[in-house]
Amino acid sequence: MLVTSRSYAEYEAMFDLTALPDSVLDCSAGGSSFTAEAAARGVDAVAVDPAYELSMAELVDTVRRSLPATTGIIDDHEAKFVWSWYGTPERRDELRLEAADRFLQDIGETPERYVAGSLPELPFEDGRFELVLCSHLLFTWADKFDRAWHLAALRELIRVSSAEIRVFPLVVQGAGEPVPFLPEILDELAGVTWEIRKVPYEFQVGADEMLVITRS
């Protein structure tokens, strides 16, 4: 199991966040510090991830072992990554380590913010969150999860949101290829409007757009 730790600064850039609403869901959050830092800003922030079923000792071990794991993907597709946002690999590593430490501290102190669950069925009531964020799951793993799964997952994210859903990135991990079924499933979404919006973040070459879905 890979439990990635991303920082609040990365979330701000990936999702082009300027201000947060009263309630936010991070799905699937992994070992990211976004929920901890959003909660510190007074937001009703909740993280959901299947990894939260692990015991605390297992989770700590998994998060720590996951920190260097994504480096292999980068090494295998070196030409597909740019360092303009991070500056250096060392700075990226610093952000990830700080995020992991903040996450582990927060889940230890306030475990109620961290809910075990996975798409396409989330353990929340309809419209529970104003903003739902989903990073590096949908579309990123389109080589493993098929079109039907993606459509069901998007509908579930819409169900638990009362206002807006943001999904980043919109390319397959590693090689950064486009997702062929993305236009088709967007056409099948009912009761929402959507747009593909540029964001001030790029790590994979060409992965500088997010999907924004707004409930009608």
Image: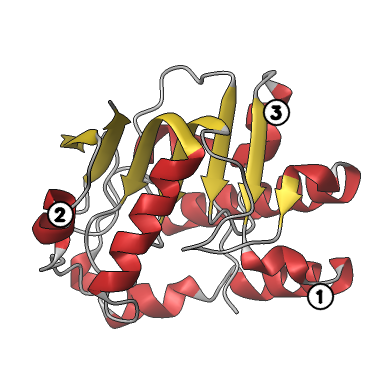
Q: Nearer the viewer, residue 102 or 20?
A: 20
User: Mark 3 and 1 residues: CB-CB less than 8 Å, in contact?
Assistant: no
Q: Is residue 7 visible?
A: no
- For disc 2, the marked residue is 206
Going by the numbered disc 3, the residue's amino acid type is Ala
Q: Is residue 144 visible?
A: yes
Residue 7 on image: x %, y %? 55, 44
Looking at the image, tell me whether mark 3 or mark 2 is earlier in sequence order. 3
- For disc 3, the marked residue is 39
Mark-to-mark CA distance, 3 and 2: 31 Å
Name the residue: 70% across, 28% down: 39
For residue 138, side relative to residue 5 (left or right): left
Up-down relation of residue 205 to residue 162 (above or below): below
Q: Nearer the viewer, residue 51 or 163?
A: 163
The figure's colour scheme reads secondary structure
For residue 64, side relative to residue 2 (left or right): right
Going by the numbered disc 1, the residue's amino acid type is Glu
Using the rendered view, name the quadrant where residue 209 is placed: top left
